[in-house]
Image: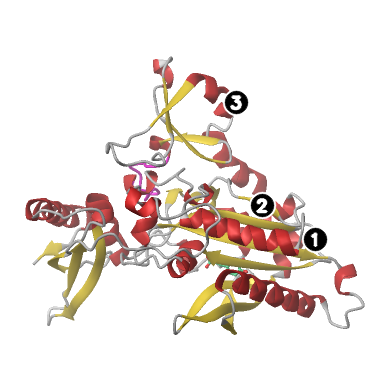
Amino acid sequence: MAATLFLKPCIFLHRRTLFALPLQFSSFSTSSSATAAPFPENKVHRSRQSPAVSASLLELGGGVNISRDEIVKDDPTNNVSDTIFSKLGMQLHRRDQHPLGILKNAIFDYFDTNYPNKFEKFDNLCPLVSVKANFDDVLVPADHVSRSYNDTYYVDSETVLRCHTSAHQAELLRQGNTHFLVTGDVYRRDSIDSTHYPVFHQMEGVRVFTPADWEGSGTDGTLYAAEDLKKCLEGLASHLFGGVEMRWIDTYFPFTNPSFELEIYFQEKWLEVLGCGVMEQEILKRSGRTDNVAWAFGLGLERLAMVLFDIPDIRLFWTSDKRFTSQFAKGQLGVKFKPFSKYPPCYKDMSLWISDSFTENNLCEVVRGIAGDLVEEVKLIDNFTNKKGMTSHCYRIAYRSMERSLTDEEINDLQWKVREQVETKLKVVLR
Ligand code: DAH
């Protein structure tokens, strides 16, 4: 059972085309702007020779190639949009001159210096994973909100775009890895503002201990691992942020016990840096490591890069505007970004009678589908229920480009399309 669930996605992912591809397919960039693209948009491959294989294939990572129609489907078990599809395969974390790549490399440096040749690094694992890997294998309860279609992108009922890099923990343990770092793009349906984007990047770390490691230390395996974890991550925070004040907060994750969050005092605020803990014994047991103990952590790269590089809006990570990209260089962590523009925002309000199935994430998905990165924020500004029990929401949509001024005409056009699709797709009544 476990094997079939796990293997299933590989079959429809054209994994076998990996070997044939370089000869048969040529890559093309969909970029239309002459100034854009110090790096290309996602690498879609199109057949030149055989019309029978005319569907474009996208390189997802891990040697997996897939066509749009296998990811974006008109099917009730699928909620992946074209906006999301366009981000697949971009792998910003693998670009050495991109703030996310620079940060990833700085974290690698820390581990390489302190644990030479110990940690295996994975940054090209396919983001399309089974529901089992994403949730069951890391003990996410069956009724956990993160499993809902409102929060996670489902390709079908058994396959998702990973919502965290923890999705790879169990498989890598089963394969025998004991020290590893996994970096990758992760996908979550969410609201829209300057710090939330439906695709972002995480790094996961895992270290396994055997009884020989803690015997003689005078403590048990769990305490030993927790102490080692804290020491390791405090060192990492100092490596990235310099001499800052830190504090540990007890918290809960389904996959660790005890679980902690690390916060640092930076720019006059407490900032959550990462989540971590001692891995639940059940995860180790299922991967055949009954006597072992492990620690694990997960951190969001954008969150840290935004404060380290002074990047004010999460959309900037995706721009190919040279005024952004040219400010960063390989190996230079923490160079402060100098904003090149402040184009004016334009606000549009939209009031609607919502239905029971309405969610803000669904609304944001519609708005992003039309306005793309021109939408800066979607904010609920009014909410009431009338005597008949009907609930009204008013949302303020902020449109603002980071690259140019928008014309009234273009914004009105976008807003009309949003209104139209909100009514038809979300089954709400506009007021
Ligand atoms: N997967 C968690 C998230 O996405 C982050 C995390 C927390 C990862 C604790 C871990 C961990 O490995 O031990 O929010």
Amino acid type at image mark 1: Arg
**Toward which corner of the image does residue 30 lie, by quadrant?**
top left
**What is the CA distance from the residue labelled 2 to the residue labelled 1?**
21 Å
Q: Which residues are magenta?
A: 71-81
Is 80 colored magenta in this rendering? yes
**Toward which corner of the image does residue 324 lie, by quadrant?**
bottom left
Amino acid type at image mark 3: Phe
What residue lies at 45% left-to-right and 24% top-to-bottom? 26
Q: Main secondary structure of the magenta part?
A: loop
Numbered disc 3: secondary structure: helix
Q: Which residue is mark 2?
A: 121
Foreground residue, 335 or 429?
335
Foreground residue, 423 or 62?
62
Numbered disc 1: secondary structure: loop
Mark 1 neighbour density, 10 Å: few (under 14) some (14–19) many (20 or more): some
What residue lies at 23% left-to-right and 73% top-to-bottom? 380
Whichever of labels 2 and 3 marks the residue nearer the N terminus, that label is: 3
Q: Is residue 8 left or right of residue 200?
A: right
Q: Which residue is mark 1?
A: 289
Whichever of labels 2 and 1 marks the residue nearer the N terminus, that label is: 2
Q: Is residue 228 left or right of residue 215?
A: left
Mark 2, mark 1: which one is toward the viewer? 2
Numbered disc 2: secondary structure: strand
- Image coordinates for residue 279, horizontal then vertical, percent: 69, 69
Amino acid type at image mark 2: Lys
Foreground residue, 296 or 92?
92
Marking on residue 19 = 3
For residue 303, say whether it is visible.
Answer: yes
